[in-house]
Every structure is written in structure tokens, then in C-alpha cells.
Image (cartoon, grey):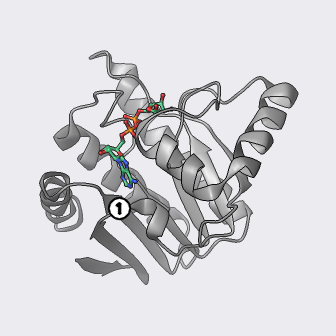
Amino acid sequence: MKIIYLGTIIELIRGDITKITADAIVNAANSSLAGGGGVDGAIHRAAGRVIAEQCRKIVKKQGGCKTGEAVYTDAGNLDAKYIIHTVGPIYRVAASDETQLSSAYTNSLMLAKKLGARTIAFPSISTGIYRFPIKKASLIALKAIKRFVEENRETFKKITLVLFSEYDFNIYKMAVATVFDS
Ligand code: AR6
């Protein structure tokens, strides 16, 4: 499903983010950028070894990526120009979780803008291994995206959220209705 908000297409797709075409594909990474399971593992496998090498260089230079921040590498074999690696919070029921999750989306969008990307695809950050409740996370994600579009008009042609399961897709569909119809 998709909606258009201030000229930007906000699209929800059910599927595998490694199969998506976009200027920037966002990865739900960890602070040490060491690769892992979930979407991170899938992206590293599909993109190829060059990504891990570039991540190691970033770690050497700046010691990794803090929670809520974002860094980028090339996209290797993915149909994209860049992979933006961001780190969502591990859910701990603290107020800071929400701010950090919101920052992960906003900082990824800011970095993609700086790189000149016009299309960007996100997975559902923090809602897998990091156990952030997806209903809450989907509202935070869409509010951050909405605010970014309002403050950065005509930056992105399309912002896609790629949801891995039908259940997740339906939760995000409800969140789109809640956030954009109000
Ligand atoms: N395409 C789209 N979404 C996917 C894919 C895929 N190929 N694979 C999984 N998902 P997670 P997190 C969904 O655990 O919670 C890693 O080990 C998945 O169903 O990938 O931010 C990192 O290295 C879920 O909805 O990320 C970190 O250590 C969503 O992606 C840690 O996990 C996010 O789940 C990060 O945990």
C-alpha cells in the first residue's frame, strides 16, 4: 500500500529488503557493525564481503556506530547505491528507547539526504532480536518519517518500509492510518 504525503510516496511492502531497488537501503545493525542475524545477516550475505570490510574500516576510524546513529557503506550486490547502517535500541522499557528509535530513523534519513538519495527503504528497526514491541515501534517510525518529510520537503521521491511478515505489514498499515490521518 502507499500514500503520498507532501509529494513523497510513503510505501509499505511485505517482503525481503535485500530484493528491493532503492538508492539507499537501511540495515538494522549493531554498534560494533560486526554483522549478525536477522536483516543484518541477510543484507551482509546478499551484498557480499566488501560490506564487512568497509564496516571494519569505519570501526577502526570511529569505533563503531552508537545507538540511534547511522553510518554508510557501498551496497555491493544489492540493487542500491548505499547501505545505511543504523543501530536501534535494545528494548528495555526506558523512555530513552523511544528517542533512540526515532533518532535511528531520522539520522538514516539525514545521511541519505546528504548522500543525494531520492529513494530509501527501511526494515522494521529494533523489532526483531532487539525485541521492541512492534505496535509502539511502528508509530515511532512513521512519526519520525512524517516529521522528516515536513521539515525536508521534496527531498525523497519515495520512502519504503519493508515488512518481513504479514503480521508486521498489518501493524504498519494501521500505524500509517493513525499517524497520517490525524
Ligand atoms: N527483509 C526485511 N526484514 C527482515 C529481513 C529481511 N530480509 N530479515 C529479518 N527482517 P532484526 P533488530 C525483519 O532482528 O531487532 C542483528 O543480529 C525482522 O522480522 O533483524 O534491530 C543485528 O546485528 C524484524 O521485523 O533487527 C543486531 O545485533 C526486523 O527485520 C540485532 O540483530 C528487525 O529485526 C538488531 O536487532
Determine the image quadrant of residue 80: bottom right
Q: Position of residue 147 (x, y in %)?
A: 42, 57
- Count neighbours of disc 1 (C-alpha within 10 A) and say few if under 14, some if 14 to 19, many if 20 or more: many
| Total tally of numbered discs in the picture | 1
Where's the C terminus, which quadrant? bottom left
- The residue at the point 58 percent across, 74 percent down is 155
Q: Residue furthest right?
A: 61
Note whether 148 is above or below 108 in the view shown.
Answer: below
- The residue at the point 27 percent across, 78 percent down is 2
> Secondary structure under badge 1?
strand
Determine the image quadrant of residue 126: top left
Front one among 173 and 179:
173
Front one among 179 and 64:
64
Note whether 147 is above or below 130 in the view shown.
Answer: below
Front one among 96 and 160:
160
Where does label 1 land, which residue?
A: 162
Where's the N terminus, which quadrant? bottom left
Note whether 124 is above or below 88 in the view shown.
Answer: below
Q: Is residue 39 left or right of residue 127?
A: right
Amino acid, disc 1: Val
Q: Is residue 127 left or right of residue 122?
A: left
Note whether 161 is above or below 103 in the view shown.
Answer: below
- The residue at the point 33 percent across, 20 percent down is 95
Q: Position of residue 119 (x, y in %)?
A: 54, 74
Q: Quadrant of ligand 1?
A: top left
Determine the image quadrant of residue 6: bottom left
Q: Position of residue 8 (x, y in %)?
A: 43, 79
| Dot 1 beta carbon under 8 Å from ligand 1 | yes
Q: Is residue 102 left or right of residue 113?
A: left
